[in-house]
Amino acid sequence: MTTGHRNCDFDALASMIALTLLYADTTAVIPRSVNPNVRRFLSMHKDLLPVAAPDEVEWASVAHLLVVDTNRWHRLDRGIVEQIGDGVAVSVWDHHPDIGDITAVEGIQETMGATITLLLREIQAQRKILTSIQATLFLAGLYEDTGNLTFNSTTAEDARAAAYLLDRKADLDIVRRLLRPAYGLRQKEALFALLAASERLEINGLKVGLGRIEVRGHLDNLALVVRMFLDIMNVDAAFGIFHHTARDRCMVIGRSTVEEINVGAIMKSVGGGGHPGAGSSLLKGVNPETVAEMLEALLRGNRRTSVRVSDLMSFPVISVESRTPMDQVALVLRRQGCTGLPVIDDDALCGVISRRDFKRIGKKAQFKAPVKAFMRTDVHTIAPGQSPGEAVALMVKHDIGRLPVVEKDAVIGIITRSDAMLYFYDLLPD
Ligand SMILES: [Mn+2]
């Protein structure tokens, strides 16, 4: 038999079904707790797939346990684990990077966007034939775990696996429908309450949404609510604090779309955990206001670890004085191989001259005129402590290629569009 973690998702289900193709006489035993999307899928496809509920299994006949999408015993359904005999061999197929406590005799444990990708490697090697239902289910698992191939954990092999499944007639209409978020009336109420109670913080140049609400009773899919909160607020990261008054506990859920804010690390320091992009923590007996203050302090303290404009800027700055004639300026531009220069008199920034400004020269004699007559004086600058993202936003907004970096009225460096973009594309030399 094969099984996966509790709160069974599409990656776990897809991986189980893939193992039933690879190993004859294997049944996929579905944990009792299943994500709402997967529950809907199973209610329609149960008869088409070799799946069973834990109470339908003849435990004595189980000789081999194939675990997917986790490498830890405690993530499996307790009712299933308790039935597994001592002599049963255990194998693991898992894509999570951490080291678990299940000792496996077989399988693949490798960091990957989704577990189904690891199994597709074997399915392709063994030239198994997939039905379109199988290909569709596998693609749903792959897309769910990789955020449609956009999460940082996505590898080239995941993308090749997606291409393989599309070749095998995976149906994108169905995949989209399967992955439609489980967003019901209560989630909508929570989202609206969160939006109404939210703050928008500017922290080290990043935008963070922070909301705090009271919840009554059990509420599924709060992570989805926080994700939608992030999208609607249009912020870099979002945190929801859900205070369960009756049980005196707070569920904190965070999502981040930027590498400067590592949600997993922040949650770890408040007793939870997660990935850089997503994490949560359950806090008992704390005041939600204190939790909000703590989060804000952690986010502000985050500054040290993130890259600032001062890390990317060039210095010393090559500049000209406002009385420098234009032909001299042209010479400096050519020699330095740059497209623009700041104009500085006695340490004070008075303008910027770029190649574009040379187009305004009408008569040849004007090449002898000082740069002052042609420079742009509506200069935009940036502070060394600001983020590369802010630098890019300013350059895009004003359609400029460089920003002088100014500290206490003095130009201490210059950051160009390519400096900032090289950073974003991870091309910075070590
Ligand atoms: Mn997975």
Image (tube, helix red, strand yellow):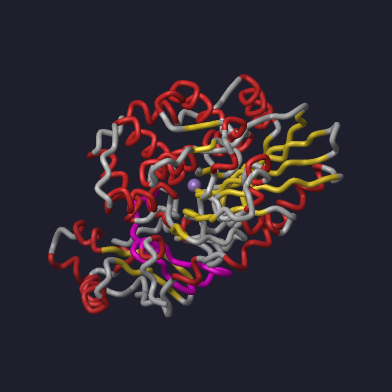
Q: Which residues are magenta?
A: 396-421
Q: Position of residue 417 (x, y in %)?
A: 35, 61
Residue plotted at (30% across, 30% down): 171
**Where's residue 178, x and y in %?**
43, 28
Q: Is residue 388 visible?
A: yes
Magenta stretch encompasses residue 427:
no
Q: What residue is drawn where x is 72% and y is 40%?
A: 241
Q: Quadrant of residue 211?
A: top right
User: Could you tell me which residue is drawn at 62 percent across and 47 percent down?
Assistant: 84
Q: Residue 412 lies in magenta, yes or no? A: yes
Residue 34, position in %: x, y? 58, 33
Q: Position of residue 396 (x, y in %)?
A: 37, 50
In this rendered view, identify the residue nearer to me: 34 or 385: 34
| Figure check: 427 above or below 164 | below
Question: Picture quarter containing residue 108?
Answer: bottom left
Identify which residue, 105 or 133, lies in the foreground.
105
> Which residue is farthest left?
364
- Residue 416's place in the image compared with 8, above or below, is below
Which quadrant is home to the C terminus? bottom left
Q: Nearer the viewer, residue 297 or 81?
A: 81
How many numbered callouts?
A: 0
In this rendering, position of residue 5 left or right of residue 106 = right
Q: Image quadrant of residue 323? A: bottom left
Residue toward you, 59 or 327 = 59
User: What residue lies at 22% left-to-right and 39% top-to-bottom?
Assistant: 167
Residue 111 shows up from this direction: no
Q: Is residue 302 left or right of residue 92?
A: right
